[in-house]
Image: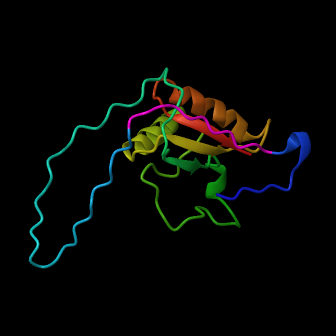
Amino acid sequence: MNLASRESGSSAPQLVLEFSASASPTPSPTPVPLTPTTAVTPTPATTPSPSPSPGNSSLAFPIRAIFYYPWFPEAWTQSGLCPYTRYHPTLGYYDTGDPAIIRQHIAAMQYGGIQAAIASWWGQGHHTDVDFAKILQASDGTGFKWAIYH
């Protein structure tokens, strides 16, 4: 892995990795090529794994994380176009500052096996700063983890 930064001295970014002992990772299923003669039998539904306890502050590698952009509803309008998308979100043209929407996003991410998100943050006084406080409150008790991307 290569990492680089133009910043140096006391303002240089740091990559901090914390490791903890954990069980071996779950093996990935082996893909089976389908041919016209291969019968596909449905697999029985499995019970989802319980979410990590809220008190557990560490994650085991590999970590599944995504970028989360709390720019909406402001970003629905750009370059004079509203909505600035060709798609229609399942939750409609949502507001990422709405705690109910944030909880739905977290639930969807956890359903997809995502353990953490990196939220875009534009600094103090910006609406993403206010929204990040709401993000943390909505996450309380879920075991979901957050990092800030500045």
- Residue 19 located within the stretch drawn in magenta: yes
Magenta residue span: 13-23
Q: Nearer the viewer, residue 30 or 82?
A: 30
Can you give x and y, in whole percent of width and height, for residue 58 in the image? 53, 30
Side (left or right) of 44 relative to 62 = left
Within the image, what quadrant is residue 30 found in? bottom left
> Residue at horizontal 50%, vertical 44%?
63
Q: Nearer the viewer, residue 107 or 11?
A: 11
Q: Residue furthest right?
A: 9
Q: Nearer the viewer, residue 58 or 144?
A: 58
Q: Residue furthest bottom?
A: 36
User: The N terminus is located in which quarter?
Assistant: bottom right
Within the image, what quadrant is residue 146 found in? top right
Instruction: Look at the picture and state if 36 lies above or below 143.
Output: below
Can you give x and y, in whole percent of width and height, for residue 144 in the image? 49, 34
* Predominant secondary structure, magenta span: loop
- Residue 56 located within the stretch drawn in magenta: no
Can you give x and y, in whole percent of width and height, for residue 92 in the image? 47, 51
> Residue at horizontal 61%, vertical 44%?
118
